[in-house]
Image: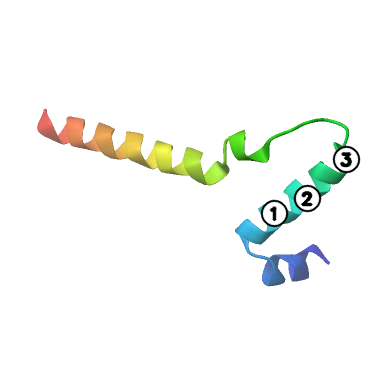
Amino acid sequence: MSYFKNIFYSKKRKREILELLALEETKEVDFDWKKEIKLSDIDKQLENEILSLNINDSEK
């Protein structure tokens, strides 16, 4: 079953579904999902750090 879910849902859509499920469970809690750190932001930051490290290594 999970194999078929992977085919039909992109990573972004999976993330949206998980957020909606979490919101259903935390209706009483005032939680702002916009302030949450997104995985894509972390990936971009890591890529930038790796690129800067590679540039610094090549300069030496």
- SS for tag 1? helix
User: Which residue position holds label 1?
Assistant: 16
Name of the residue lying farthest toward the top: 60
- SS for tag 3? helix
Q: Label 2 crowding class (10 Å Cα cut-off): few <14, some 14-19, many 20+?
A: few
x, y (%) of residue 59? 11, 32
Distance, label 2 to label 3, CA atoms, is 9 Å
Write down the quadrant of residue 35 in the picture: top right
Return the mark for residue 20: 2
- Nearest the viewer among 50 and 60 is 50
Return the mark for residue 25: 3
The answer to whether the residue labelled 2 contacts the one labelled 1, judged by CB atoms less than 8 Å apart, is yes
Name of the residue lying farthest toward the left: 59
x, y (%) of residue 38? 57, 41
The tally of labels here is 3
Left or right, residue 51 beside residue 59: right
Identify residue type, mark 1.
Glu
Left or right, residue 42 beside residue 28: left
Write down the quadrant of residue 45 in the picture: top left
Return the mark for residue 45: none
x, y (%) of residue 32? 68, 35
Q: Is residue 15 above or below residue 50?
A: below
